[in-house]
Every structure is written in structure tokens, then in C-alpha cells.
Amino acid sequence: MTDRYGVIGHPISHSKSPVIHQVFARQTGQDMIYEAFDLEPAGLAEGLNGLVAAGVRGLNVTVPHKLACVALLDEISPRARLAGAVNTLVFHADGGRTGDNTDGVGLVRDLVGNLGIRLEDQRLLILGAGGAARGIIPALLEQSPASLCIANRTVGRARELAAEFGGAGKLGSCSFEALSGQRFDLVINATSAGLHGELPPFPDSLAGGKTCCYDLSYAQQHTPFTRWAAALGAGAVHQGWGMLVEQAAESFLLWRGVRPDTAPLLQQLTGWRQSARAGEA
């Protein structure tokens, strides 16, 4: 029988995860299908139970469910516990449900391995303090940056997150407005505003000529964040296509016991993945 997997989120129609996992399945000879399921927050628990009852063996989790799913699981991995959020669910034959978080390792694989971006001794900034930010902070701190700042529209959430991870490395926090005039080597947009075509009030000074701007979101064209960064002359601008592929490969490994080769798919994504230099807005 063909095994069923999928991704849950709200909205979810933009997701390319089904395409990616179908490519992985063909590459590795796995008999499986992968679908997208739109679950509203109010119906998350009921929807999850329904998918398990329908025979789904595993799920990826995206906005806005990465934090809420934790309470619906029997066990989570150490890295998911550290992040306080999950992006991968595994449903076992005995009825057990476990969660993991492959976002951080996926991001670092893309930044360092695919894009050649140095993280050690660099000044890093994360915009946003939700589930997406939580999932990448531990992996970024493992790269020994000079500093890591978390900025959020509501500064209290940024402070709470920085305090929670404070023992793992050098962390700071502030509001978006307080970023004015500050300089960073790498700025990572972990807000979900782009899904709604919005751009939070980021100071224009963030996107300098020596700054790399990376959006965890992705789209066929520029996202609001990458369009903003490129128009302001950022040194490099990237969307999260590579992270998407790399974290998916880690999820696939958890489900099927084999890690697919991501290089062929990343090459195919040339038409999807936006990697703009300054001025190419």
C-alpha cells in the first residue's frame, strides 16, 4: 500500500513541499504520496486526529501550527524541545506521535553549504519572534556568530525569546524601530507578513551594501521582504527555497530512513529560487 504524508498549515496553497517530496520519492524509489492539508488553528487538534485516522504516516508543519502542535504530541526530539516548536511529525504504528524540528539544520545547510555564507563571528539579525524564529535560533547559535539579535514588532516577545535561549549564546533583543542605524552581516526575515503581501516597519538602514538579506518565505517572484531589500541595495538577497529543500530532505530521512540528494532538485529550482543582487528589484 502506498504510504501517505503531507504538510499542514493555514494558508497552504502556496506550498511547494508536495512537489519536492514527490521528487525525493522518485529519486529514492519510495512508494508514497505527499499532500497539502489546510487546517485552521481552531480545528488543528481535530484535523490532526482525522489525518492520523485516515492513515497519514507523517506530516510537515508550517505557519501557524509549529508551536501549537507540540502540545498534541507524545514526544519531541531534543532539538525540537530546545526550539519549542516542531516542523516534522511522525505517526507510529503503535499510535504514538513524535515531533522534530529540521528548520534550523535546513537553514544552515542552505546558508553555509549552498550559498557559501559565513556565520561564524558574524552579526546576525532575526526579524520576528514566532515559531519560525524559534526553530532556527539553536542551529544559528551553534555556528558561533559574534552576536544574534531578535527583533519583533512587540518587543516583549523578542525579549522573552532572547531570555529563553540566553544560555546558549550571545543574544540580544529589540523592537523594529530600535534597529534604525544598526548594521548586521546577515538579516533573516522570520515574520509571516509576506504570506499576506505585507512588510513590517523595518528601518531602511538594515539593507546595506554589505548585508545579506534572507527571507524564510519564498515565492515565484520577489517576496515583499526581498523586493524591499533589493531596492535598497542589499549586498545579496535570497529567498528560502534552499532551506525548504534542505529541511524537507531531513524530514524525508526521518520518515523513510534515507536522505535524498538535494543538489539535483536545487538545480531544477533555478526558475523558482530568487537570488537577486543589489539593484535587481
Image (cartoon, grey):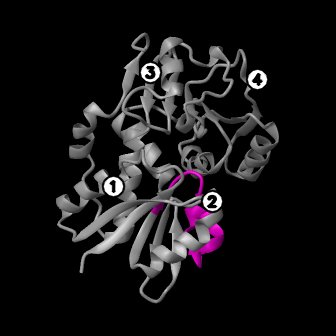
Which residue is disc 2 drawn over? 41
Q: CA distance from mark 4 to mark 1?
A: 38 Å
Q: Secondary structure at mark 4?
A: helix
Can you say whether 269 is above or below 75 in the image?
Answer: above
Q: Which mark is residue 236?
A: 3
Query: Going from the N terminus, do you reach mark 2 or mark 4 first?
Result: 2
Q: x, y percentage for residue 217?
A: 48, 38
Front of the two marks 4 and 1? 1
Query: Going from the N terminus, do you reach mark 1 or mark 3 first?
Result: 1
Query: Going from the N terminus, do you reach mark 4 or mark 1 first?
Result: 1
Quick one: which residue is furthest to the right in this view?
Answer: 156
Front of the two marks 2 and 1? 2
Query: Which residues, given as a range, are shown in magenta?
Result: 60-80
Q: Secondary structure at mark 2?
A: helix
Front of the two marks 3 and 2? 2
Can you say whether 9 is above or below 172 in the image?
Answer: below
Query: Going from the N terminus, do you reach mark 4 or mark 3 first?
Result: 4
> Three-letter amino acid code at disc 3?
Ala
- Please rate how many residues cluster around mark 3, counting C-alpha atoms within 10 Å: few if below 14, some from 14 to 19, many from 20: many
> In this orientation, which residue lies closer to the viewer: 98 or 163?
98
Q: Secondary structure at mark 3?
A: strand
